[in-house]
Image (tube, coloured by chain):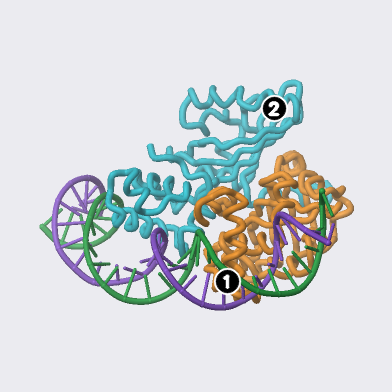
Chain colours: A orange, B cyan, C green, D purple
Amino acid sequence: MDDLTEKMAQAFDAAPIGIAVSHHRVLSMCNTSFAKMLGYDRPDLLGQSFRILYPTHAEFDRVRDIGLKAMEEHGSYSDERMMRRKDGVPVWCRFRARTLTPADPLAHLVMSFAPIRDQLDGAQLTKREREVLSGLSRGLTSKEIGRELGLSPRTIEDVRARLLRKFEVKNTSELLSRMSYARPAN
Amino acid sequence: MDDLTEKMAQAFDAAPIGIAVSHHRVLSMCNTSFAKMLGYDRPDLLGQSFRILYPTHAEFDRVRDIGLKAMEEHGSYSDERMMRRKDGVPVWCRFRARTLTPADPLAHLVMSFAPIRDQLDGAQLTKREREVLSGLSRGLTSKEIGRELGLSPRTIEDVRARLLRKFEVKNTSELLSRMSYARPAN
DNA sequence: TGGTTATACGGTATTGATACCGTATATGAT
DNA sequence: ATCATATACGGTATCAATACCGTATAACCA
């Protein structure tokens, strides 16, 4: 094997950001940063379903279809999401994905994960707050988020109001300018 | 060479985030995302000084000492910085670095670079668009931004509408979720 | 020279966001 | 046990955002 490949493999493993490869939501490769970020050793993770890295099965199901359309069109997608560490502590991450198979995005995915807040901050957000935040960052209205979560739009407004209070911001725009991030260029 | 190394090298290159390795500020390895982000092909970059990737020599000097102390203590460092694309266009990045040689951090660095703003196919934001974006990210209304810039609120709405069209987003929330850290106008 | 875009401003109409009022249940902490 | 908080939902009122209609000027580019 050539020196170039060796160097790339070393850079992969030493990267200051978590990187993982999946095939149909099963992890086939990851670097040390990724494993450590989630409290595992790499051998524990290889071959595992991504299910164990999400807080709940519902969350695992929910995120599956998010971004599928963007990946079919642009080959890439990003958002922010909560991952679950081995000890159960939630980790709030900037997530970026690129598919190598745009026709069937989940068939071969390469992802990067960067923790954006310490665990304490992340843990302070409730499940509902994360779900609503996810919708807001995708530009959905209260009505649309309510439909997605099977709740009254009125309840979404309550949750959003709580988020605004917690982060001491004036409105949703200011909230998202603090919580969100950009899609990777390709 | 074993299959594991091969897989790691593939993941490195397909990662949705720029990754680079340097020895004393000379780039020894990078992935395709990194090269493309800055408008190069990888072979153009290998062996080059990082100098060419910064807007000015002064900026190149300035960032050298930034984070050195943090890396000596923790082995890693992160900030936001401006990189310079081959065509001269500045690119704002979330920068993360890990040193493999804490005693002399710059001796062996592994870095990740994530653009924090969409590239819009090379097109750039106008001065007005940046000014308005800055106001929006601070949660100001059109009326408030208009007052700040000495313009009619109506004009602010025009600029905002243009931003929404350019980035193909539904509303200001989705816009800001992609733009994070809007920079004040220059 | 005409076409495109950015800028700047006016109007109107509809929808969404935000802030209040209220009730109710469940949970967890002091 | 009481208090605080999260959840969930109803109403109303007001303001902002968004999408249209229009005009006008200036810059740049083929």
Residue D14, given in percent of the width and then of the height, sits at 39, 64
Residue B122 appears at what percent x and percent y? 43, 49
The reply to whether residue A124 is visible in this rendering is yes
Residue occupied by mark 1: A154
Label 1 crowd (10 A; few <14 / some 14-19 / many >=20): few
Chain letter for mark 1, please: A
Q: Nearer the viewer, residue A160 or B88?
A: A160
Residue B6 seen in this snapshot: no
Image coords of residue A139 (percent x, y): 52, 63
Determine whether label 1 and label 2 are within 8 Å by CB.
no
Q: Tag 2: Cα neighbours inside 10 Å, few (<14), some, or many (≥20)?
A: some
Left or right position of C10 against A3: left
**Viewer-nearest residue: C1 or A179:** A179
Residue at 52% across, 68% down = A141
Q: Would you identify the image quadrant in which residue C2 lies? A: bottom left
Determine the residue positioned at 43% across, 38% down. Answer: B88
Q: Amino acid at mark 2?
A: Ala
Q: Which mark is residue A77?
A: none
Circle 2 SS class: helix
Of tags 1 and 2, which is closer to the observer? 1
Quadrant location of the C terminus of chain B? Answer: top left
Kind of residue at disc 1: Arg
Judged left or right of residue B51, residue A95 is: right
Q: Which residue is painted at 55% across and 53% down in the image?
A: A176
Q: How many marks?
A: 2
Q: Secondary structure at mark 1?
A: helix
For residue B124, side relative to residue C1 (left or right): right
Q: Give the distance between the C-alpha atoms of the residues marked 1 and 2, in whole angstroms.
A: 46 Å
Nearer to the camera, B153 or A3: B153
- Which labelled disc corresponds to residue B70? 2
Furthest residue toward right: A44
